[in-house]
Every structure is written in structure tokens, then in C-alpha cells.
Amino acid sequence: MKGMDKMKEVIIIILDKFADWEVSFVSLALNSKEFTLNYSIKYASVDKKTKTSIGNLKVLPDITIDDIDDNASGIVLIGAKDSWNNLDNEANNKIINIVKKFKENKKVVGSICDASRYLAINGLLNDCKHTVNDLNEIKNNKNYKNHENCIKTDINSIIDKKIVTSTGTGEIHFAMNIMKALGDIPEEKIRLFYDIYTKGFEKAYKKYNERNEKNGI
């Protein structure tokens, strides 16, 4: 049965001054049984000290980046004001290696806002279509060589196979694309998530129930 499948984990990496609106929708989408029965999330950071968001939300990380399990289904890097630019060399190298490993193993890698810029200037978006807040911030960086595949889109998020990127204002589409990239979340649940937060509960559930009736569910 679908609901009895083995639980899978997605690791969300946050830093101090993280953007709370960017993490809220993706964490909800993956951790709520309303949308999937088979995923849970853990928060990781460079240490286990409390991280405070731009909006003064305080989060105690579950694990450090050293504890990220290679068997996780994906990692998601959340934007953070200034923090991605100020990682020490050790933490920077660890995160780059984690991202490379997940990409090599064809696991989901997601990044939003400053985290997408971070991946770009470390040469980690050179092999996929992607978006960032502002191409001008990265186009002259020596490690970035993929201008032609930097896409500006009205929905502010791009999915290319298992790589999902977003600007800092694409949090709903970013979460939806993460769900799609994982590859095993039912399409009707992805639609339900998207419709709830773009059309409202009443319209979303009306559409959801009509689809289920049409499909004999």
C-alpha cells in the first residue's frame, strides 16, 4: 500500500538569518501527511546552535552537516541574509562536497535565493537549467559558466531533472518543484498543495474531490 512505504528523509540546510518564508512551504509540503505519507524532514546546519531567521523565528537544528545521511532523498539549501557569503572554509568545503555527492547520486538538490547564488558561484549549476535572484550577481564569477541556461521565469523557480532552483520570491513554486523532483509523490497531492496556497482551501478541495470522483477514488 502507498501509505505503508518506507519513510524517506529530505534534509533542509539552514544558516543564521535564514529566510523563514522560503523554508515554510517546502517543509510543510514534505512533512505534512496531507500531502505525502512517505517523507519527513530534518534541519541541518554548520553546528547545532539555535539559528534565528530574518523574522526572528528560532530553530534548533536536528543535525550538523557532518551528520547528513547519504541515503537521504534530497537536500534543500535555504537562503540566508549574508550567511552564505560568510561561511568559513571548512563549512564551505563540506557543503560543496555534500551537494556534489547528492548530484552524483542523482538525488534531489534544491536551492532558493542566496543559496542558489551560492551554488552558482561554486560551479554547481554549470550543468543544468536554473534561476537565481539576479544574473548580474554571478555572471562574472570565474566558477560560473552557464549563462545560457539561467532562466528568468514568472513563477521564479526552475526544475531540471533533480535540480530545483528558485529566487527568493518563488517559495510556493519551489516547494511544488521539490515535490515533483522527488518523483514519487502523487500528482494529485502536488496539485492539492499548489491549489491550496494559490487558490484557497475551498477551491482547492473542490477541485481535488472532483478529480477523485472522476477517477473513481
Image: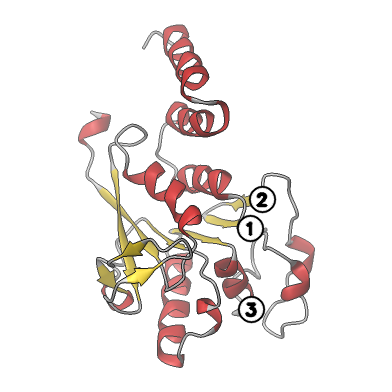
- The residue that mark 3 highlights is 121
* Rendered location of residue 123, percent (x, y): 62, 77
* Rendered location of residue 72, percent (x, y): 32, 59
Q: Earlier in the sequence, mark 1 or mark 3?
A: 3
The residue shown at (22%, 44%) is 6
Q: Nearer the viewer, residue 150 or 204?
A: 204
Q: Is residue 196 above or below residue 97?
A: above
- The residue that mark 1 highlights is 167
Name the quadrant of the N terminus. Answer: top left
Residue 181's disc number: none
Q: Is residue 154 above or below residue 81?
A: above
Q: Is residue 144 above or below residue 113?
A: below
The residue shown at (46%, 33%) is 193
> Helix, strand, or loop for circle 2?
loop
The residue shown at (36%, 12%) is 217
Amino acid type at circle 2 is Asn
Amino acid type at circle 3 is Ile
Is disc 2 surrounded by few (<14), some (14 to 19) or many (20+) residues within 10 Å? Answer: many
The answer to whether marks 3 and 2 mark residues whose Cβ atoms lie closer than 8 Å is no
CA distance for labels 1 and 2: 5 Å
The answer to whether marks 1 and 3 mark residues whose Cβ atoms lie closer than 8 Å is no
Q: Is residue 74 above or below residue 182?
A: below
CA distance for labels 1 and 3: 15 Å
The answer to whether marks 1 and 2 mark residues whose Cβ atoms lie closer than 8 Å is yes
> Helix, strand, or loop for circle 1?
loop
- The residue that mark 2 highlights is 156
Please identify the residue farthest to the bottom as the structure is shown.
89
Amino acid type at circle 1 is Thr
Q: Nearer the viewer, residue 13 or 180?
A: 13
Is disc 1 surrounded by few (<14), some (14 to 19) or many (20+) residues within 10 Å? Answer: many
